[in-house]
Image: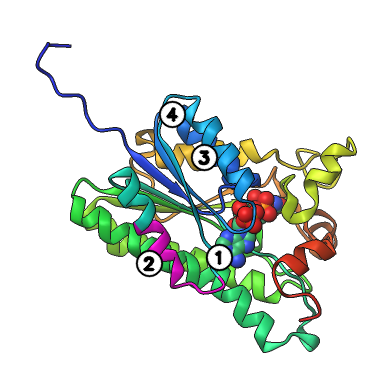
Amino acid sequence: MSADRVPAPRETAIVTGGSSGIGRATVLALARRGFDVGLTYRSRRRDAEAVAAAARSHGVRAATHALDLCDAGRGAAAVDALADELGRVDVLVNNAATNPRGFFLQQSLAAWRATLEIDLTGPLACAQAAARRMVAQGGGGRIVNVTSVLERVALPQGGAYCVAKAGLGMLTRVMALELAEHGIRVNAVAPGHTATPMNDGDRRVEAGGTDWPTIPLGRSAAPEEVANVIAFLCADESSYATGGTFLVDGGLLLVAGPGVLQEATGLPPSDGQLERDGLAGAE
Ligand SMILES: NC(=O)c1ccc[n+]([C@@H]2O[C@H](COP(=O)([O-])OP(=O)(O)OC[C@H]3O[C@@H](n4cnc5c(N)ncnc54)[C@H](OP(=O)(O)O)[C@@H]3O)[C@@H](O)[C@H]2O)c1
């Protein structure tokens, strides 16, 4: 390097729901690749601080911010606060979500609205704030929306979640079209069954079991296996990819019929999950 060359500023990535599961693994995958990282958490502040500390051990800057998307409008404020603190935003990963279950006949409008607010309108608000800053900065950007195999297939008791994820998949394609002229690439990653607290998968790991014989690869994903695909879509190696949904499901959708899908994704949520979401009894 010549003595007077100014090094390019480090790129900054913001990950919603970075305190746990796939979001946590994504923060660390991006930090390993040299991104400064901002992450949001809803209830697990201490876990978020621990993730930020682990990110800093890779020599990057890291910041945390509380965000509950039960009011989607807060998403923009959180993205702006993290971008202000870290100086810019080049990458947004819309990862935070809730996954309550409810039979259609018993579905309350309150629970329906809450899920769509968190899982669909929230990502829209976060992406709008990030994209506006990317446009103002010049130089493009990348947005990855984390959807689900349930973006593509229906699951009993999954009405609000399936609709929110299908909507986010379609929003991904609309955003990709509209933002291409600004050099902003937008993609979705659709995980299959992944061992995280969302589906008690972490308890299964602790119990020594993540085997799912009906999934072609024979097991759940580790969060890192999903995070690596997200990180690839945030990197220049994927420079011609936009508007796509990338399945990371161990081949699940190749064989998914209702029974297989119910077994692979249909674990009832823990009572704790529903209570944390304020949705206990709302089904
Ligand atoms: N795990 C799977 O099998 C699976 C399959 C398909 C798709 N996905 C998708 O992958 C993404 C990550 O899920 P995960 O499995 O990693 O779940 P997770 O471990 O339960 O993490 C969820 C994250 O979202 C945050 N969050 C929850 N409710 C929120 C709200 N109301 N407002 C803002 N943030 C909120 C949580 O914050 P706190 O923990 O701080 O409260 C946490 O950081 C989600 O979009 C999910 O739909 C997961």
Residues at marks 4 and 3 touching, judged by CB atoms closer than 8 Å? no
Q: Mark 2, residues whose alpha carbon is within 10 Å: few (<14), some, or many (≥20)?
A: few
Question: Compared with residue 273, is residue 282 higher up or lower down, i.e. above or below?
Answer: below
* Mark 3 Cα-neighbour bin, 10 Å: few <14, some 14–19, many ≥20: many
Residue at image point 59% right, 49% down: 247
Residue underneath mark 4: 33
For marks 1 and 4, give the CA distance: 28 Å
Q: Which residues are magenta?
A: 70-80
User: Alpha-carbon distance for marks 4 and 2?
Assistant: 28 Å
- What amino acid type should be assigned to the residue bearing mark 2? Val
Q: Is mark 3 within 8 Å of ligand 1?
A: no
Residue 278 horizontal/vertical position (percent):
71, 73
Image location of residue 263, percent across then percent down = 85, 57
Q: Residue drawn 41% across and 56% down?
A: 243
Q: Quadrant of ligand 1?
A: bottom right
Q: Residue 174 — which label?
A: 2
CA separation, marks 2 and 1? 25 Å
